[in-house]
Image (cartoon, rainbow, N blue to C red):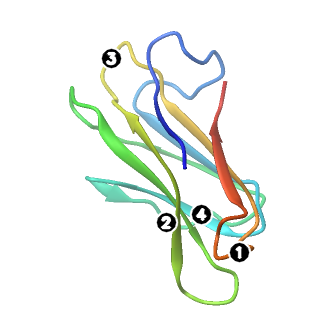
Amino acid sequence: MASATLGAGTAVAAPSTGTVKLCADGNYSVRVELPTMNSPLVTPGSCRSWKVSTGPTFVPVRVVGKFNTSTNMFHIDTYYWTSSPGWLGLGIHAGGTTANGGQGAWSYLES
């Protein structure tokens, strides 16, 4: 599982300040979980964006997948992010498969 912090100047193509973007590039639905919100599920082959306020602190952004054969969810990655001015938005792509209890899933940040 990856853990990363996204800072100013890190990613040219990242979403604008205060925006979290999530793309489901794998064969499963995915969502993000923050202390202030849980996003709706993003279906395979699509992307969604949300404006999120974290204040000046970094918060954990958990990437969570949904198994295709049940209503159960599984953890993929956690990133740490702030919506403060001067910091980029967060663009996450989740891919792979739900094989091996979700071990076939992965994520990466837009750059």
Disc 2 from disc 4: Cα separation: 8 Å
Foreground tag (4 vs 3): 4
Mark number, residue 30? 4
What is the crowding at mark 2: few (fewer than 14 residues within 10 Å), some, or many (at least 20)? few
Pair 1/2: label in front: 1
Q: Element under label 1?
A: loop
Q: Is residue 58 above or below residue 71?
A: above
Q: Residues within 10 Å of mark 4 (few under 14, many from 20)?
A: many
The type of residue carrying mark 3 is Pro
User: Where in the figure is residue 109, as x and y percent of width and height?
Assistant: 61, 35
Q: What is the spatial separation of the Cα atoms under label 4 and label 1, in whole angstroms?
A: 17 Å
The residue tagged 2 is: 40
- Percent across and percent down for residue 16 are 51, 25
Label 2 or label 4, whichever lies nearer to me, is 4
**Mark sitting earlier along the chain (4/3):** 4
Dot 3 alpha-carbon crowd within 10 angstroms: few under 14, some 14 to 19, many 20 or more: few
Q: CA distance from mark 1 to mark 2?
A: 24 Å
Identify the residue at horizontal 76%, vertical 60% (top origin): 26
Residue 63 - label: none
**Disc 4 versus disc 3: distance between alpha carbons?**
27 Å
